[in-house]
Amino acid sequence: MKEQKKFNVSFYKTGEDEIMPFVEIKFQGKENKIYKALMLMDSGSCVNTLSAEMRSFIEDNDWLPEESDNVVTLDNEETNHPCAKFQFVMDGYMFQEKFLVFDDMHVMQVGDRMLIGILGTRFMQQYHLAIDYEQMLLHISDLTLQDLQKKQCNLIIPIEYGLRYYNGPILKIRGDKRDAIAYVDTGSDSVSISQTAIEECGLSYKITADKHSVIGANGNVDAKVCELDFRIADHLGNDIGMISYNEEVYILPHSYNVTEDGECDDDGNLLPPIEGMIGSPFIAKQKWILDFAARAIYKLKTT
């Protein structure tokens, strides 16, 4: 990224009620044609992904068939994807990044722009970005966790542990019997939790629909819909003091295994699977700021 000016990118307004962190980019396609498109800032993914339909726009020598990487899908299948290098401009800054290419990830119409891919947590950490639901923008941060502790904040949640062991920020959904690990997932438009967690955590819920299709980057999975009361805590179990009443939640058929069975952190604590996702509408309602420089989620005090 070439330094040149302050970096502030407003979330792209789609005309929908739900708030998602879409950001506008420009890129040069074949025959030097300039296109405008959208990327989704996705804290539930560590990698950048690009639709294979972009092949018709990008020069052939930007595709890297000799390079590939694996990802775990919503169905817990490990799939292998080729890579591409993709150069784009965002708010006057030039980026050239590596993307995994998904054959079944389709270019989507969002408002009057096309959504062509996602930018993951490695990108956010590399460029010290903050996804700011208070101001509805993406910006560069120079803050540290110590800086935040000196600011006027209503809430500070460290996310170093989640970034280190799960490649994304995590919280706990608290139950009467046990807690469930959940991604703070800006790429999701809902709150979701696994069937196992619903049954084992002792959560109070009511089924409102038997079947709903939840969209992932590499396919869909069927889920039930329920109204759910839940509290949240940080990864250590420290209660954040927030209770969500009658939140519409999707019940997924299984957990999301981003860690290996039996894998532990450096202190020997077992790393349980991801059993839920706390999505953008919920995050926006709380006006959280996800700061990948400070490695914390925080909320400023309002005057």
Image (cartoon, grey):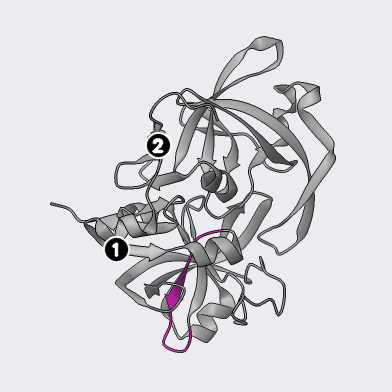
Percent across and percent down for residue 205 are 42, 77
Say if 183 sits above or below 91 in the image: below
Spatial CA distance of label 1 from label 2 is 23 Å
State the residue position of label 2. Answer: 11
Q: Amino acid at mark 1?
A: Leu
**Residue 282: in sight, yes or no?**
no
Say if 238 sits above or below 164 in the image: below
Percent across and percent down for residue 202 are 45, 86
**Image check: 13 left or right of 25?**
left
Q: Residue at x 47, y 44 (%)?
A: 128
Q: Which residue is situated farthest in the left direction here?
A: 303
**Image check: 253 left or right of 203?**
right
* Stretch of the chain drawn in magenta: 168-178
Residue density around tag 2, few if under 14, some if 14–19, many if 20 or more, within 10 Å:
many
Q: Which mark is on residue 155?
A: 1
Percent across and percent down for residue 45 are 59, 52
Residue density around tag 1, few if under 14, some if 14–19, many if 20 or more, within 10 Å:
some
Q: Residue at x 53, y 26 (%)?
A: 2
Q: Compare residues 197 and 220 and report the one nearer the observer.
A: 197
Q: In the rendered structure, which disc, 1 or 2, sits on the residue that comes first in sequence?
A: 2
Q: Mark 1 against mark 2, which lies toward the viewer?
A: 1
Q: Which residue is situated farthest in the bottom direction here?
A: 177
Q: Which mark is on residue 83?
A: none
Check if residue 132 falls in the magenta segment: no
Q: Residue at x 72, y 23 (%)?
A: 58
SS of the residue under disc 1 = strand
**Residue 162: in sight, yes or no?**
yes
SS of the residue under disc 2 = loop
Percent across and percent down for residue 297 are 39, 58
Q: Compare residues 166 and 106 and report the one nearer the observer.
A: 166
